[in-house]
Amino acid sequence: MRPGPARGTNVSDTFVVTSAMTARVDGRELHPVYGTGALVADIERLCRQILEPHLEPGEEGVGAKLEVLHRAPVAVGETVTLEVTVASVGPTSLVCEVLARHNATIVARGSFEQRLVQLERFREETAARREPHDADG
């Protein structure tokens, strides 16, 4: 990984919760609120924005550890601000702390760790884990 990002580097996004972001299981809406699945996707997106400028050619980041405490609902049509801040950087890892707010309420907090891998080795490992498929099926 290229030098950085520095501890304390942050990025944020403010957005309106849409019906596509609601709590869902098997495509069925459970509650018309910002779902944990959408929250996790947004966390990964913002943490990735911090990591990408520091990747070397042939290097890739993969999610390694996620901790999220989803504390309060946010209804469709309401605004959420999600902020991620670099907590630590290692030779092969980046950990970001996460805070999501709706107005003055903290609706979620947690951390996300990305590990750095060599892309070619990662592809080889992925291929080696595939189940053999029948030539007819």
Image (cartoon, rainbow, N blue to C red):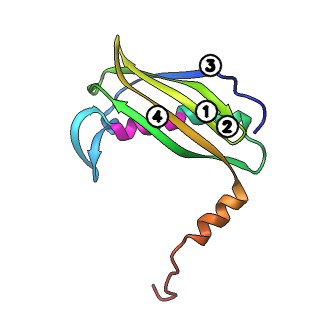
What is the magenta range? 36-45
Q: Quadrant of residue 127?
A: bottom right
Q: Position of residue 23 (x, y in %)?
A: 28, 39
Q: Earlier in the sequence, mark 2 or mark 4?
A: 4
Residue shown at 67% from the left, 37% from the top: 52
Give me the C-alpha separation between circle 4 and circle 3: 19 Å
Q: Position of residue 29 (x, y in %)?
A: 23, 43
Q: Residue furthest top?
A: 104
The residue to which callout 3 is attached is 8
Compared across the picture, whether 85 is left or right of 103 comes to right
Amino acid on which disc 4 is placed: Asp
Picture disc at residue 49: 1
- Dot 1, how many residues are within 10 Å of its Cα: few (below 14), some (14-19), or many (20+)? few
Picture disc at residue 52: 2
Q: Earlier in the sequence, mark 4 or mark 1?
A: 4
Q: Position of residue 115 (x, y in %)?
A: 62, 44
Q: Earlier in the sequence, mark 2 or mark 3?
A: 3
- For the residue pair 21 and 93, the one nearer the viewer reads as 93
Give me the C-alpha separation between circle 2 and circle 4: 15 Å
Q: Position of residue 2 (x, y in %)?
A: 78, 35
The residue to which callout 4 is attached is 42
Q: Earlier in the sequence, mark 3 or mark 1?
A: 3
Q: Are marks 2 and 1 in contact (CB under 8 Å)?
A: yes
Q: Quadrant of the C terminus?
A: bottom left
